[in-house]
Amino acid sequence: MAVADKIKAFLKIKGKDTAALAEHLHISKQALSNKYYRDSFSAEDLIKIADFLKCDLAFIDNMDRVNFDLCDIKDGE
């Protein structure tokens, strides 16, 4: 399943819509639509989406877990 499809599915589970996500990302709905179409989300996008959805973005390997959050985004952005 593409990342874009996973994001759409999780938006639905959380009762959020694409317009609210675009606003949270500070981009237009068309720009978000293009990201969905191209399945092209940056690491920064994914961190911000996880923040919007109030969930964790992490690498998980057996019992090891590395979480990513807004602190991982470079200053000035």
Image: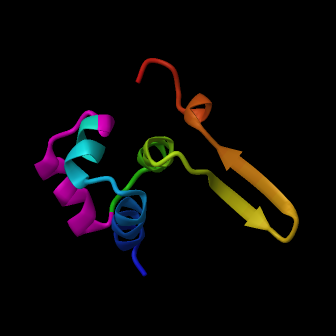
Q: Which of the 4 image quarters holds residue 2?
A: bottom left
Q: Residue at x 43, y 47 (%)?
A: 49
Is 44 placed left or right of 8 in the picture? right
Q: Position of residue 75 (x, y in %)?
A: 51, 20
Please tell me whether residue 28 belongs to the stretch shown in magenta: yes
Q: Where residue 57 sits in the image (x, y, percent)?
A: 60, 53
Q: Which residues are magenta?
A: 24-39
- Is 41 in front, or is 48? 48
Image height of 5 relative to 45, above or below: below
- Quarter of the image containing the C terminus? top left
Q: Position of residue 5 (x, y in %)?
A: 35, 73
Where, by quadrant of the figure, is residue 76 drawn?
top left
Q: Residue at x 50, y 48 (%)?
A: 50
Is 68 contained in the magenta span? no
Task: Please indicate whether residue 71 sits to the left or right of residue 64 in the image.
Answer: left
Q: Quadrant of the N terminus?
A: bottom left
Q: Is residue 23 left or right of residue 12?
A: left
